[in-house]
Amino acid sequence: MRIRTCAGKRRDRGFTLIELIVVVIVLSVLAAIAYPIYTGYLEKSRTSEAVARLGAIMKAAKAYYQRFNQWPAAPGDDGFYADFTNTKHFSYSIDSGGGGTGSFALQANGLDVHGMSGITVTMTCPDALSEAFISVEGI
């Protein structure tokens, strides 16, 4: 765009090619930095889904222990009311200690959806009166 100034001189207004290239480079660097941070945030938020589900299953397992004086051996045990159905990102299972009185562990394995394969969330309870411990691998 050409504009005439008071002195009658013509002056060009607009961006030069160099200025546009610098802006594109700066935006590319910012995107390259932000993308890994964003994907890590998504993995952690999806992992919280597994932690919440495992907490509900552990609560049901503790109720089963109170009633039968042992941990449930399988998801379908009579009197064990827990939801082991797969969610969008994880499958759930009893990892160890089922049917006994020692420690008890539940596990959520990441499904091959949105890059969640290889992520494992384990919730372990040393006994029926203790709080459970959570470990996450693969992030």
Image: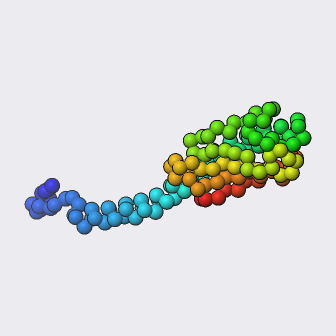
Image quadrant where residue 23 sits = bottom left
Instruction: Locate residue 50, reporting x and y percent.
Output: 65, 46
Q: How is the image coloured?
A: rainbow
Point out residue 137 in the picture as x, y percentages from the top left corner.
64, 58
| Residue 42 shows in this picture | no
The C terminus - image quarter = bottom right
Q: Residue furthest right?
A: 69
Residue 5 in view: yes
The residue located at (88%, 47%) in the rendering is: 101
Q: In percent of the image, x 51 and y 58: which residue is there?
A: 37
* Frontmost residue, 19 versus 106: 106
- Left or right: 124 with respect to 84? right
Q: Quadrant of the N terminus?
A: bottom left
- Residue 74 location (% of width, % of height): 76, 41
Residue in the picture at 73% in, 50% down: 95
Taking 13 as reference, is 41 left or right? right
Towards the viewer: 43 or 95: 95
Q: Residue at x 69, y 36 (%)?
A: 83
Q: Position of residue 93 (x, y in %)?
A: 69, 45
* Observer-nearest of 73 and 23: 73
Please tell me how many numbered marks the rendered image carries.
0
The answer to whether 89 is drawn above or below residue 78 in the figure is below
